[in-house]
Amino acid sequence: MASKSQAPSQSVGPGYRPDTQKPTATVSTEIPHQNVHILEQTPQLIALLTMIRDKNTGRADFIFYSNRIIRLLVEEGLNHLPVVEHTITTPVGRSYSGVKFEGKICGVSIMRAGESMEQALRECCRSVRIGKILIQRDEETAKPKLYYDKLPEDIADRWVLLLDPMLATGGSALMAVDVLISKGVPEDHILFLNLIASPEGAKSFAERVPKVRVVTAFVDQGLDEKNYIVPGLGDFGDRFYTM
Amino acid sequence: MTKTLHYSPPWGDASIIGVAGSSGSGKTSLALAIVASLNLPWVVIMSMDSFYKPLTPEQSRAAFRNEFDFDAPEAIDFDILVDRLRDIKQGKVAEVPVYSFERHARVEQTTTVYSPHVLILEGIFALHDQRVLDLLDLKIFAEADADLCLSRRLVRDVKERGRDIEGCIKQWFGFVKPNYSRYVAPQREIADIIIPRGIENTVAIGMVSSQIQKTLAHKSSQHQLELGRLGKIAEESPLSSNALIIKQTNQVNGIHTLLMNPETSREDYIFYFDRMVAMLIEKAADYLPFQPRQVLTPQGNVYMGLRNSAGMSAVVILRGGSAFETGLRRTIPDCRTGRILIQTNYRTGEPELHYRALPSSIKEDGLVLLLDPQMSTGGAALMAVRVLVDHGVPEDRIVFVTYLAGRVGINRVLSVFPEVRAIVARLGYDMEDRWVEARYLGC
């Protein structure tokens, strides 16, 4: 194993339950960076992650349970978007000082695994525009290479939700951020939505682009010699699309 | 809030009316006439025929020869009858046996009787057993001319119970007539009302029916008083610690604003409401019991995770709760879903239980979600929780999930059922009129 820290283990469960009644499970590794937001480690989230990590979980269940986690990611990610005050009169005739969503958004998926997150994004934002970026590993240099991108023309005026379920070394995600910045998207208007990250990948990403906010469900133990996330869940794209 | 309070539903002290009389005296039609004149769903007729003892093989052979005495008190299983009547009196669920006249045996399935406000027990020995008499609120004796009784019995037994004329006449003179004078007639002495001429006697039926109506009105006002008393207690306490208001993030606040704005289109309203419900259900699912579970990833790595260790079901409080179903299925597509219809009587303001269909596994589930988009006074919620508890769901496995609720309503429910939890998307005003489901369903 190239790098592998001790996985944190703790009892998880709602506050009202005494610790003795909370089952113990491996939870996300903490990351000190301010711009990395890890979803609350609830027993329900851990159970969903357990389902999609299990090699015996079939494709239909894999798709369903990863969708549920991605929806939680999208909901959390959307909370980082700005709102403005908006006062309305309720159906029972009272005044309510609420808020209104401000600013246009769009999704950008890093092909192909990132595209698996589009459905959950649409379930929360119906008519959201979605751009695509294809980045492949160059066999000669072993470095990521940009093959294709198709993005909304006015992307510079939008908040961008960048989608990729697995963050291993962070190479492709960083390249995708570079593409967005080169199109005029301010760095602090980018939100990176991610299912499982390696601590190395999360750290280097957070340090290289400190204004991009990362929303992830789980930071794993580390990477193996082939740069796969450990324990990870295998190849997300294969399990979602073809296996 | 540590003090446990008591809540008795309107069916908590069911009135039981006994109708006795000779075979063929028209007890059943009389009971039906009383029910028809009341025209209320909370009145149930229970026939003592359901409580015939199962026969031994020998007795059964005698029965098929028309030589078994069905018209003696010994043929009736009074122990079970008393047991079931006590359950009904206390507002519990009672399983009433079903007796097959073709086979002279009890059949496998039972009939469930739950939550009648009034139960009419009819049978030749309805006023015979002292234990039954102790449970009765009104004792009626139906009287009819003996010739009329015989002819009615002949017609019924031949047409509906597949007997032959000779057998029936043999039974009449061998058992029915002697038993009448020995056991049935004496019940006249203890009856409150003796009704001659059966259903033709509209004056008597009117009297009984107005007596029952008086009882129902009294129960209803008692129930209202009780709700009021619980409200007083709830007003004085801070929000119960068993109520969880979801985190009011920017998204949640933004969705609240859209949902509350009457100018939001119905399409948008439904879309954002479904989204909110999916969040609420995810939150509620954390209350499921979990167990450690170790899995292997496709690369052969070990992960120490968790799995649900028990099933989850949901009970929709109609009609509002049906607005939760899309969001529920998005999160748990195969969630077993029961339904209960509780309607608030617009005249009395009292919640009324009209219908219930619950999953049979509900007792064993690790979590039962009770779904209603809006809680106002908490009256319907109290009744719904009570129905679940009566059906054997432990209180601490019930989570009430609602979009909008007021503090008083929540406290009312959680002070009566201190182990139930509530998940609320937005804490609103107390006693706010219902509007959430009307916007969703469009009427």
Image (cartoon, grey):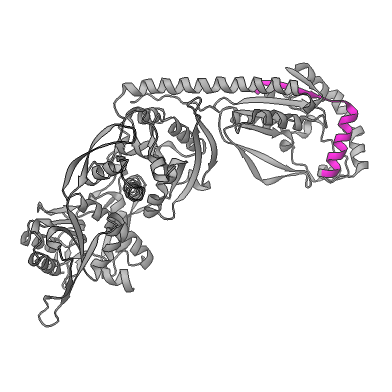
Relative to A243, say whether B189 is above or below: above
Query: Residue B157 magenta-drawn?
Result: yes
Which quadrant of the figure has residue B243? top left
Residue B215 in the image, given as x and y percentages of width and height: 60, 20
In this rendered view, identify the residue nearer to me: B13 or A113: A113
Residue B127 in the image, given as x and y percentages of width and height: 74, 24
Which quadrant of the figure has residue B216? top right
| Magenta region, main secondary structure | helix
Q: Which residues are magenta?
A: B133-159
Tell me: B200 left or right of B347.
right
Residue A130 in the image, given as x and y percentages of width and height: 23, 64
Tell me: B374 left or right of A24.
right
Query: Residue B221 magenta-drawn?
Result: no
Which quadrant of the figure has residue A15? top left
In this rendered view, identify the residue nearer to me: A157 or B153: A157
Rendered residue at 21%/45% (across/down): A100
Relative to A27, say whether A52 is above or below: below
Rendered residue at 89%/29% (across/down): B177
The reply to whether residue B389 is in sight is yes
Relative to B175, say whether A168 is above or below: below
